Image (tube, grey):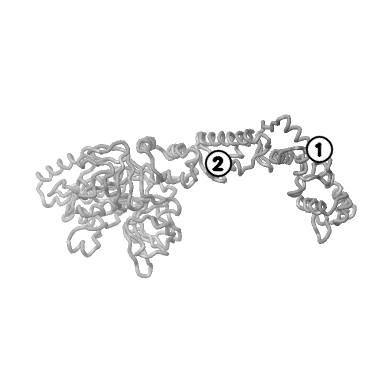
Amino acid sequence: MKRVVVGTAGHIDHGKTQLVKALTGMDTDRLREEKERGITIDLGFAPLDLSPEVRVSIVDVPGHERFVRNMVAGASGIDLVLMVIAADEGVMPQTREHLAVCQFLGVHKGLVALTKVDLVDSDWLEMVRHDVEDFLKGSFLEGAPIVVTSAVTGRGLEELKGKLLELCVEVPERSAGASFRMPVDRVFTIKGFGTVVTGTVHSGRVRVEGVLELLPQGLSLRVRGLQVHGDYVEEVGPGFRAAINLAGVGKEDLERGYVLVSPGAFVPSTFVDGSLSLLPQARPLKNWTRIRFHWGTAETMGRVKLLDREVLNPGEETLVRIHLEKPVITAPGDPFVVRAFSPVVTIGGGRILDSNPSPGSVKRQKLYGQLSALRGMPDWKRLEFFLMWAAEEGLTPREAFLKTTRSVPVEEVFREILLRGRGVSLGGRYFYREAVVSLKRRLERVIVEYFQENPLKLYVSREEVKARLGPMDERVFHALVDEVAGDGKILVSSEGISLRTWGPSFSPEEEKWLEFIRDQYDRGGWTPPSEEEVFKKGGIPSEKGKALVKLLLERGDLVRISREILLERRWAMEMVMKVQRHLAEKGELTVGEFKDLLGVSRKYAVPYLEFLDSKGVTRRVGNVRKTKGGGTGKRQAKGEG
């Protein structure tokens, strides 16, 4: 069954509630004060089945100027408006204000009911009809059906239903979207069930036993039950007037204006960026004027920052940043209404362009240019712009999702950017393609500069490179290194990072020292000298000598056994072969046997054996060494043969 939400609108005492009762048989004035005073104060709701295929949810709103905030809450999320104008009074102030509200909230279609026609004669009725037609010119209701009705006599009710059905058939089906969102308009408790909230589902779906997030509090709540106009259902979706029985929260923790959403899909924000249009009859709006901001069922105070001027004149439109006193839960494309702080009248409205602007100050001119580029863009194009503005920072998938309308998963939005070659996914973040090119160039430059400053180095550690690059997500950094290595610009190994075309350069004196150090360790065999002994003997400055030793270690010409002992590579390899042959023959090796094997004292024997243990050549078992595999040396030798 197709579901359409219809909202009433119109001046006080023009017969909205009576008309809804005549159409549905339901009195939507539920409060004692409403019945005592004979006026609608809060929102009322009633179902109307126009055909077996179409069910209408009617939202009846108050017409008194003091309760326009409730009217705005009720008009949020409606598909069609039923503008009610009494034939005995015609167009009145709240008629005009309600029409403006509906226009700002993005309502595109509706119809007019001329009520109380039983109180006027035909000539007066014809005059009022012409006045209404003139009033609607230039609005979204220009040319809309105008149906003459009487809730008392029943005149025109069937015609009204017929016209309403025609419009409902034309209303496009709402897209489910990726994320559930329902602004709360009523909160109450039912004995035996607990807390219940109602609202119009804007997007997404939720099932019984599903989990929703209550914003702005951030509470995680379980859905105990769902109703649509008194009928129990298993699931609700876009356009449903839903009553949701919630577990884990009390009535005192909820109020109109809160929003139920898919967990993690929305983030409250205390400022939003968007377009703002001022009504022709409004007063000029100065920069930083305090206003009342209405979105969904919420109202909060705020101030308007005009981005390209100091005064917005009546009938004009511009781009703004609205600073709010309480957080709101919006998405790009959402409509909003602005009312004056005092006197409290509707003065304008607009559309959200960025519901979660990045924190920090931005120059008005720059922000104006950015927002201008976002108007009317599909999600993929919007996200492409935000990635471009994020530059080398990029966006996490969640940050990227918040820049979209949340109508589809962000992966689908980003896939379009990937297909067009405009984006790159790197280390769990999304980047604009040019930003990654810039990052790669910066990484290469940092590495080159390091080797220019350290001409005797063969490798630079990842930690050193990352420190020189500045703050960067760990995963992004490692993915960036892999990207540059894949391009063939650098070599990455366990020793560190090196340039493919880089080699150390030496002065004649440094080359002489380098050969001297290697020769001393070659001559020393398994009883090598200490580093300081070599430097002193060769007349090599200590710092220069240490740099040359590190180079020989990086090249593999020397092997570090311990902090004090270095071996020339040939002697280290021969030591390993001697030990392996011994173990293959005897199965185990004692410290004494090892000393005899190499002809060294315990000073060298113990560090050598610990080195062999660390490299997996041997393993210590009590006071002897055995092969790493655990079997006897003879069995292993046989197996390897």
Residue 32: where, in percent of width, then height? 22, 65
Seen in the picture, residue 273 relative to 256 is either above or below; the reply is above
558 sits to left or right of 5: right
Q: Please name the residue shown 13% across and 44% down the image.
A: 128
**Which of the two labelled residues, at mark 2 and mark 1, occupies the earlier sequence position?**
2
**Is disc 2 in contact with disc 1, using a CB cutoff of under 8 Å?**
no
| Percent position of residue 632, x then y | 86, 56
Q: Nearer the viewer, residue 19 or 406?
A: 406
Label 2, label 1: how far apart the Cα atoms are: 47 Å
The answer to which quarter of the image holds residue 30 is bottom left
- The quarter of the displayed image where residue 216 is located: bottom left
- Around disc 1, counting alpha carbons within 10 Å, would you say few (fewer than 14), some (14 to 19), or many (20 or more)? few
Mark 2 or mark 1, whichever is nearer to me: 1
- Give the farthest residue toward the bottom: 192
Q: Quadrant of residue 446?
A: top right
Q: Residues within 10 Å of mark 2 (few under 14, many from 20)?
A: some
Q: Which mark is residue 519?
A: 1
Please name the residue that numbered disc 2 is placed on.
426
**Is residue 430 in view?**
yes
Please provide percent x and percent y for residue 427: 56, 44
**Residue 109 can be seen in this image:** no
Q: Which mark is residue 591?
A: none
Name the residue nearer the viewer: 134 or 603.
Answer: 603
Tell me the amino acid under the disc marked 2: Leu
Relative side of 399 to 607, left or right: left
The kind of residue tagged 1 is: Asp
